[in-house]
Amino acid sequence: MSPGLGIPAGRPLAAASVRVLIAALAAVVIASACSAPAPPDAMHNAANRTPPGSGTIDSSVVPPDSAIPHDSLGASMRRGLALLAHTGDSLPGYVGANLRCLSCHLDGGRRPLFSLVGAFVRYPRFVERSGAVATIEDRINFCFTRSLTGRVLPAGSREMHDMVSYFAFLSSNVPPGAHVRGEGTPQIATLTGDSARGAALYGAQCARCHAADGAGTVVAPAVWGPRSFSIAAGMAREQRLASFIRYAMPFDRPGTLSDQDAYDLAAFVMSHPRPDLPAKSRDWPAGGAPRDVPYATTGHQAYHPPPLIPRTGDTLDMIVPLPAVLPASPAKH
Ligand code: HEC
Ligand code: HEC
């Protein structure tokens, strides 16, 4: 561990963390009041996801990319970064959208919003959405299949290893269990968007880069339509999308929109057709889907569902498989 982080291993829970824990537990109890009792995993994760801003580490602990070593591991890290930046060109069979990983994970994953700093040490973790423990490879594949409207990249491929290597670099100096400023979605009030107001704002503020028909231009990717993120992407949730727009867009003038503007834009963007994801109704198998999930799941009604564009081809490889339980097998000799 590098000096100066001030996070001794095994630090006892500070009073503030206990308050966060209690607040998180209360939130889980309220959210699940009408459904089945929250599984203990959900409580554990809620407590783990300290809101951005109260993180203990700043992403500046990560050395610049120029510090990537000049050896075989360093070469893998550089290839990983190149894959995040040129995902569709490098892996055309695995990407359906005209997005790249860095379309949402800005500044090479370092921008404090959906930040990838520390992601490597946050896995494996239990993911409520799939009701299972996910490895970092599974998590990357959730973004391939859902955010890039693509297909599952084999976990044993060199390309997957390269991306994981770069994520390991981005977690340099982040001790396991530490929270990093900017992980997750920046907090934003819960408001309701007005898509008619959003349409006018989109024309004035967004169409010059993302095109009037939402399909994107040479300078920016699609925000709706067949080449956009799928309905089951995290970005398709109104609050996440509003937070991203509020803090990251317009790309050349971020932070100039109000919370309400951001919700109106999110509502407008999400009123258009976007690609489907097979088996999405199996998400949150134990219930407890957040309010703004735009499709129906156990105990949850679709929030403002957009028109769907069917996916073509083999649908099985659009679904990240749950961990398989091996059958009892005879001893090997
Ligand atoms: C359409 C936007 C979008 C694109 C494109 C995208 N992601 Fe994501 N990604 C997200 C969102 C949203 C989250 C969840 C952030 C949160 O927890 O609030 C996320 C989370 C992640 C996480 C987990 C972070 C953590 O700390 O738990 C990883 C790893 C990740 N993405 C990798 C990738 C990779 C690799 C690609 C390209 C193959 C990619 N993403 C493309 C939106 C996107
Ligand atoms: C100056 C050009 C520009 C403007 C104006 C702009 N964006 Fe973007 N936007 C970008 C770029 C570039 C990216 C992707 C960043 C990258 O790939 O490095 C992006 C990414 C996005 C994304 C995530 C990726 C995707 O396409 O789904 C969303 C959502 C988005 N912008 C919405 C908006 C909205 C809403 C507005 C209007 C408030 C807006 N943008 C204005 C350039 C722009």
Image: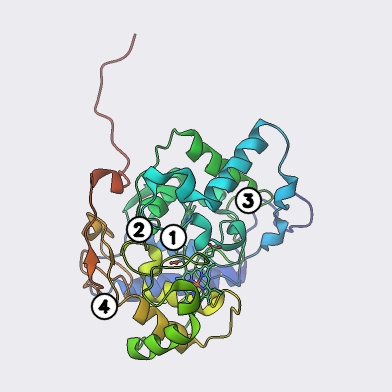
Q: Earlier in the sequence, mark 4 or mark 2?
A: 2
The residue to which callout 2 is attached is 128
Above/below status of 172 relative to 248: above
Q: Nearer the viewer, mark 1 or mark 2?
A: 2
The residue to which callout 3 is attached is 170
Mark 1, ligand 1, within 8 Å: the answer is no
Q: CA distance from mark 1 to mark 3?
A: 22 Å
Q: Hey, what amino acid is under mark 2?
A: Glu
Q: CA distance from mark 4 to mark 1?
A: 27 Å
The residue to which callout 4 is attached is 304
- Residue that protrudes farthest toward the right in the picture: 3
Q: Earlier in the sequence, mark 4 or mark 3?
A: 3
The answer to whether residue 54 is seen in the rendering is yes
Q: Nearer the viewer, mark 4 or mark 2?
A: 4
Instruction: State the SS at label 4.
Output: loop
Q: Which numbered disc covers residue 45?
A: 1
Above/below status of 291 relative to 1: below
| Residue nearest the viewer, comparing 316 with 171 | 316
Above/below status of 329 relative to 229: above
Q: CA distance from mark 3 to mark 2?
A: 25 Å
Q: Hey, what amino acid is under mark 1?
A: Asn
Residue 174 location in percent, x, y?
65, 52
The image quadrant that residue 203 belongs to is bottom left
